[in-house]
Image (tube, grey):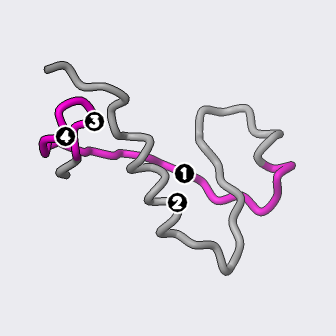
């Protein structure tokens, strides 16, 4: 993925690898009562899956990169 360096404003190639496992939950209560390590998201029939994927990619981006 090509990003713009915020320091020098040159394009920077940033490798992105996302390996996320999410479980769909029917209610917020189901999410709050879970005691394991699986991440859960509140699901509905009309949820925007692209939004979910976009969030995972954004979270995978580095805050800063060593020069």
Look at the numbered discs 4 and 2 and tell me whether their residues touch, using CB distance below 8 Å: no
- Label 1 or label 2, whichever lies nearer to me, is 2
Q: CA distance from mark 4 to mark 3?
A: 5 Å
30 relative to 57 in the view: left or right = right
Task: Mark 2: give few (<14), some (14-19) or many (20+) Cα within 10 Å.
Answer: few
Tag 3 and tag 1, C-beta contact below 8 Å? no
What residue appears at the point 82 percent right and 39 percent down from the top-left corner? 33
Q: Secondary structure at mark 4?
A: loop
Task: Give the residue pinned by disc 2.
Answer: 52
The stretch in magenta equals 4-30
| Mark 1–mark 2 CB contact (< 8 Å) | yes
Location of mark 4 (residue):
9
Task: Pinpoint residue 62: horizontal percent, then vertical percent.
Answer: 33, 32
Q: Residue at x 75, y 39 (%)?
A: 34
The alpha-carbon separation of the residues under discs 4 and 1 comes to: 35 Å
Toward the viewer: 27 or 10?
Answer: 10
Say which of marks 4 and 2 sits in front: 4
Mark closer to the observer (4, 1): 4
Instruction: Identify residue for label 1.
Output: 22
Distance (Cα) linking label 1 and label 2? 10 Å
Q: Are marks 4 and 3 in contact (CB under 8 Å)?
A: yes
């Amino acid at each position: 993925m090509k990003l713009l360096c915020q320091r020098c404003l040159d394009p920077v190639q940033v490798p992105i690898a996302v390996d996320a496992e999410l479980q769909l939950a029917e209610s917020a209560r189901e999410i709050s009562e879970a005691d394991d390590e699986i991440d859960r998201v509140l699901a509905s029939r009309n949820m925007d899956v692209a939004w979910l994927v976009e969030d995972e990619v954004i979270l995978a981006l580095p805050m800063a990169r060593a020069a």
